Amino acid sequence: MNNILVKVEYKKYQWEVCGDFKGIAVSLRLQAGYTKYSCFLCAWDSRTTGTHYSRKHWPHRQSLTPGMKNVVHKPLIKRSKVLPPPLHIKLGLMKNFVKALEVKGPAFTYLCGKFPRLTYEKVIAGVFIGPQIRQHFKDQQFEAVLSGKEKAAWQSFEKVSNGFLGNFKAANFRELVQDLMGSYEQLGRNTSLKMHFLFSRMDFFPLNCGAMSDERGERCHVR
């Protein structure tokens, strides 16, 4: 990664960086894998799952010091230059939702039939791309086969995608995010790093998430 940044003369131009959280972690020299402190902005403890839906505020990281809280080496880029990846967060929410469905239930069966070219392994892992998610938002038949908790979570996911993570920012976006977290908690899903950013790090998002796009990179990453 350092060699790539040298080749593109990153120090000279200091571009803002938008990518998936794995790429951001590499650039900030965080330890890879399922680490305890995976957020580069605060000391969110990814393993205390019992507090994820109740505790919103976590201690801020004053710096990324090598050898402390899963920081391996000196960061290659500045944290202030990192942009949150809206599509990557949507894909994570979709994955969390699909993993909550009963494998033999009507909703999961409908998903397999709607996207016959996707392998069973990809469907059960919740691996979808942006256009497929948008297509699904328009599918009323899918909502018809969802149970009460599943439908509430799906509708909350759609509202956050359209009212916060896209070109339009709803006046009640904080309420939409709060409803999303509550509905996913009802599904029994653990909070991921992507959900943590929505729940606890909303101040890090720009006024218009639609002004940046990580969709092309995500298409390559997924396939």
Image (cartoon, rainbow, N blue to C red):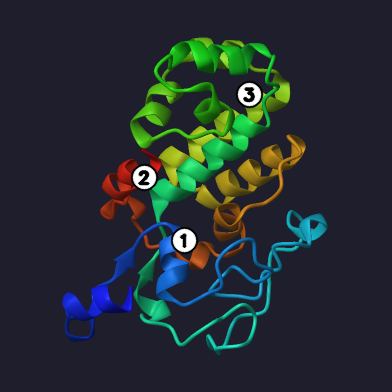
Residue sitting at 66 percent across and 46 percent down? 181
Q: Could you tell me which quadrant the C terminus lies in?
A: top left
Residue sitting at 69 percent across and 63 percent down? 46
- Asked whether 5 or 20 is in front, the reply is 5
Left or right: 216 in relation to 172: left
Label 3 sits on residue: 151
Q: Does residue 123 show up?
A: yes
| Spatial separation of the CA atoms under disc 2 and disc 3 | 21 Å
| Spatial separation of the CA atoms under disc 2 and disc 1 | 22 Å
Label 1 sits on residue: 22
| Spatial separation of the CA atoms under disc 3 and disc 1 | 30 Å
Type of amino acid at the residue the image marks with label 2 = Gly
- At mark 1, the secondary structure is helix
Classify 129 as above or below 58.
above
Label 2 sits on residue: 166
Q: Could you tell me which quadrant the N terminus lies in?
A: bottom left
Residue 42 coordinates in the image, percent (x, y): 60, 75
Residue sitting at 50 percent across and 30 percent down? 122
How crowded pointer 1 is (Cα within 10 Å; few <14, some 14-19, many 20+) is rated as some
Residue sitting at 17 percent across and 85 percent down? 12
Mark 3 or mark 1, which is nearer to you? 1
- Asked whether 212 or 104 is in front, the reply is 104
- At mark 3, the secondary structure is helix
Q: Earlier in the sequence, mark 2 or mark 1?
A: 1
Residue 13 coordinates in the image, percent (x, y): 17, 80
Q: Earlier in the sequence, mark 2 or mark 3?
A: 3
How many marks can you see? 3
Q: Earlier in the sequence, mark 3 or mark 1?
A: 1
